[in-house]
Amino acid sequence: MIGGRWPRLVQPDCHERCVRRMLFLSQTDAVRGPMAAALLREMGAGSVGANSAGIEPASGLHPLTHAVMGELGISMAAHTPKPTIAVAGIGFDIVIVLCSDTWEVNSTWAGSPTVRWFYDDPVRVPPEHGQRLKAFQTLRDSLAHRIEQLLNLPLETANRRVLAGMIAELPE
């Protein structure tokens, strides 16, 4: 649900009690990955662990990432883009790769099932007439739609490889 609040799952504090831990990989960890991780944490009320990382991390989040997430009341102030090495020691149940450039470099992740959810980089959209802002909003809404569907999957009971197959099939 965009523009409102999502139904919350019962566990507000994840840590060791997460149903699943997921990593979102992108090229710079400045737009797609941080959006997806923040949406999963917010919509899943912390019951699903969510991290993001980038192959070539940017020096900071793109300003429009802050803006469009802020439209939903989600602060991105604490996020700093990080390299994949920063999350390499964390055991992830599922890794979701968000762009084809990243897939070419990292199609597998330390034995974790890896899923493709490719999205174009909204930074590449021309800024004229609000086109870039609209691209950021469209990306956010598409990620939110998929994540809402992800949260309806049998996260607690499905084998992680079976679950990865289900996640891969979720429509935008």
Image (spheres, helix red, strand yellow):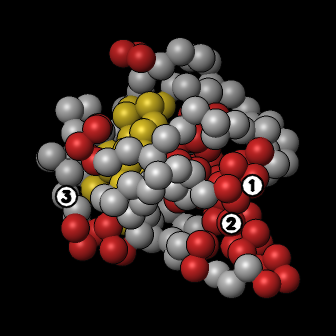
On the image, the x and y values in percent for residue 99 come to 41, 69
Mark 1 against mark 3, which lies toward the viewer?
1
- In the rendered structure, find residue 117 and report the number of the disc placed on it: none
> Depth check: 132 or 149 in front?
132
> Depth check: 26 or 157 in front?
26
SS for dot 3: loop
Please report whichever mark, 2 or 3, sits nearer to the chain's N-terminal start: 3
CB contact under 8 Å: marks 1 and 2:
yes
Would residue 52 appear left or right of 134 to someone viewing this image?
Answer: left
**Distance of mark 1 from mark 3, alpha carbons?**
30 Å
**Distance of mark 1 from mark 2, alpha carbons?**
7 Å
* Residue type at the position of mark 2: Phe
In the picture of the structure, the residue carrying the numbered disc 1 is: 68
On the image, the x and y values in percent for residue 64 come to 70, 59
Please report whichever mark, 1 or 2, sits nearer to the chain's N-terminal start: 1
- In the rendered structure, find residue 108 and report the number of the disc placed on it: 3
Give the crowd class for mark 1: few <14, some 14-19, many >=20 residues within 10 Å. many
In the picture of the structure, the residue carrying the numbered disc 2 is: 136
- 25 above or below 16? below
**Distance of mark 2 from mark 3, alpha carbons?**
27 Å
x 45%, y 47%: residue: 81
On the image, the x and y values in percent for residue 46 come to 55, 26
SS for dot 1: helix
| Quarter of the figure with residue 11 | top right
- Residue 163 can be seen, yes or no: no
The quadrant of the image that shows the C terminus is bottom right
Please report whichever mark, 1 or 3, sits nearer to the chain's N-terminal start: 1
* Residue type at the position of mark 3: Thr
x 81%, y 48%: residue: 71
x 73%, y 32%: residue: 7
